Image (cartoon, rainbow, N blue to C red):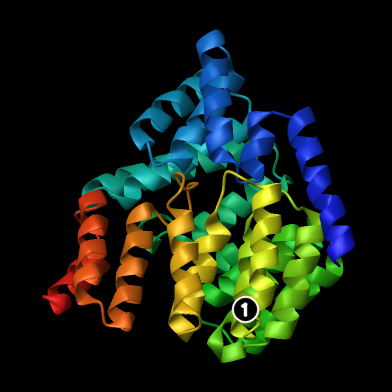
Amino acid sequence: MHTSLAFVILSAGAWAAVDPDPKALMQNGHFKRARDLAEAAYRAHPQDARAAFLLAEARNAFGDYNDALKYAELAVRLDPKNAEYHRELADVYGNIGLKSSVFKQFTLAKKCRAELDAASAMDPKDVENLDAQMTYYLEAPGIVGGDKKKAQAIAEEITRLNPARGYLAQAQIAAAEKGDDSKIERLFQKAVEADPHNYLALVRFANFYLMDQHKNYVLAEKLASEAIQVNPDRIAAYCTLVQALVKQNRISDVSGILARAEAAIPDNLAPYIVAGRVMLNQGADLQTAEAYLRKYLAQPPEPGWPPHAGAHWSLGLLYEKRGDRAQARGEMDAALRLNPDFEPAKRDLKQLK
């Protein structure tokens, strides 16, 4: 495994050198790199629909929803026949809705659905269009068109077109409905069997086995390792793999995986906070756990991974476990300086006083 992993990691660096396309970078989770390129492309071509779309996607990922909306709407105006641009605009509407008043949520949900319908009308068999529609029907309240039966019907249509994606969609529905765990496991298994090189299927199946109620850390390790070989340029599988190793008490193997992850993806240190937190929860080698949490603070995180406030909170818990309440309070204070609304840090700081 180590030889093949080293090979694919070297390959990842080559890919990055040849293909600096912002969309490809975002698909692999490299939003920091992509944002710089997208901003430069838009400055050079402010009336180019693709440039506006890419900047909208980057801003959306970083939570800059007002800017994302401006650029997503511009992309659709400049090229109204591009389904991908309509899907991005729908996603921005949805994200804004999550932080809006109930009345505004209703309006934004209708706009979101209209954009998804527009995308689907352009290509009703496109799996990305169908998956976005399925998620809407699954998550939206009935008053704005949510419909679990429609979600299931679309998931079955996806399965006919792309079995691996379809089984993942069905697993998403089963999990949302708190379905039978054995059914969810079978759906993940079918997804991996349908496409053994589907990165998302491998990672989701691995994470299923990390959960306490169906723990099988050996299988989680195997699936995560396979995902890394499929695409060593994405970070999620490294995070899953270090969790599986810590949960097997193989602490000595973790540092090697962290080094490989950092060599492959130097601008995303997420595996360090994941390893540090799992070690903290297990009470395993708190000194090394502290070093991993500190390492995570060395650079800004990618969207979707814990903010630095979360890392300071974890350090606070670690110092509390050691009995160093003063330093624990200092870390909770640091977390709240970065995010004054961070409830876990508020709660734990109150208990430490």
Residue toward you, 27 or 69: 27
> Up-down: is 23 above or below 229?
above
Q: Which image quadrant is residue 235 in?
A: bottom right
Task: Write the residue at 39% across / 62% down.
Answer: 142
- How many marks overall? 1
Q: Quadrant of the N terminus?
A: bottom right
Left or right: 133, with 108 as reference point: right
Query: Residue 60: horizontal and vertical position, in percent?
Result: 45, 38
User: The residue under label 1 is which amino acid type?
Assistant: Ile
Q: Residue at point 65% right, 47% down?
A: 265
Q: Please provide percent x and percent y for residue 157.
A: 73, 60
Q: Residue furthest left?
A: 353
Task: Tell me the quadrant of the picture where the C terminus can be found.
Answer: bottom left
Q: Secondary structure at mark 1?
A: helix
Position of 153 compared to 269: left or right?
Answer: right
Q: Nearer the viewer, residue 9 or 343?
A: 9
- For disc 1, the neighbor class at 10 Å (few under 14, some 14 to 19, many from 20) is some
| Residue at horizontal 47 percent and vertical 64 percent from the top | 291
Viewer can see residue 42: yes
Residue 147, how many percent across, how many down?
49, 64
* Vertical comparison of 39 with 221: above or below: above
Q: Quadrant of residue 225?
A: bottom right
41 lies above or below 64: above
The residue labelled by disc 1 is: 251
